[in-house]
Image: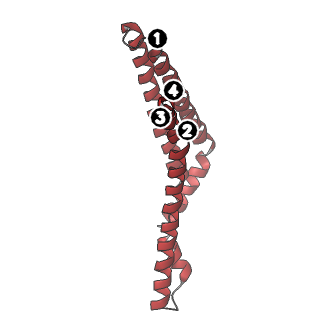
Amino acid sequence: MENLGAMLVPIACGCILPIVAILSGVRKKMNETNQRTQIVLAAIEKNPEMDIEEIMKKISHKPRLLKEKLLTKLLWGCLATLLGICLIGFGIYLNVSQLGGTNDPLTAVCFGAISFVVGITFLFTYYVGKKMLAKEIEAEEKRVTTQE
């Protein structure tokens, strides 16, 4: 019976938690869509001659610009790299001070190395994307400024 309790925690974290997260995301999108639909229906009821496309443009989400997407990659790259460096340093500290026994320092270093590599990957994709998409970003900025 003790083993059952120890097995339920990883099962809940590995199976149930992701399902709940996905369902809550889907439910949020459905609620947003329903709210937009109600707004459009109310506008049509009040004024049937109103331009529906114009209303939809005003209430729909603006797509993220390429520059915003690249800056998000830079942010996550910096955060993950810094977290990786901190975890590796913490693992080394535990190993040197003999506070963590035999497994804890290795676990911290492994998670730190994984986080560090993920961060470096985000930074790499930021710099490569910045070089490759420079012309597209410039054209997108001109298009956005002319629309406003």
Cα distance between the residues tagged 2 and 1: 37 Å
Residues under numbered marks 2 and 4 in contact, where contact means CB atoms less than 8 Å apart? no
Closer to us: mark 2 or mark 1?
Answer: 1
Looking at the rendered structure, the number of numbered marks drawn on it comes to 4
Sooner in the amino-acid sequence: mark 2 or mark 4: 4
Closer to us: mark 1 or mark 4?
Answer: 1
Graded by Cα atoms within 10 Å as few (under 14), some (14 to 19) or many (20 or more), the crowding at tag 3 reads few
Sooner in the amino-acid sequence: mark 3 or mark 2: 3
Cα distance between the residues tagged 3 and 2: 43 Å
Where residue 124 appears, x then y in whole percent? 57, 33
Mark 4 lies on a secondary structure that is helix
- The type of residue carrying mark 4 is Phe
Eyeballing the image, is 111 above or below 10? above
Residue 5: numbered disc: 3
Q: Which residue lies furthest to the right in this view?
A: 132
Cα distance between the residues tagged 3 and 1: 25 Å
Sooner in the amino-acid sequence: mark 1 or mark 4: 1
Q: Mark 1 points at which residue?
A: 102
Cα distance between the residues tagged 3 and 4: 33 Å
For the point 36% across and 8% down, the residue is 97
Specify whether 39 is left or right of 132. Answer: left
For the point 49% across and 32% down, the residue is 1
Where residue 8 appears, x then y in whole percent? 50, 37
Q: How is the image coloured?
A: secondary structure
Q: Name the residue under label 4.
A: 116
Cα distance between the residues tagged 2 and 4: 15 Å
Sooner in the amino-acid sequence: mark 2 or mark 1: 1
For the point 61% across and 51% down, the residue is 136
Q: Mark 2 points at which residue?
A: 126
Closer to us: mark 3 or mark 2?
Answer: 3
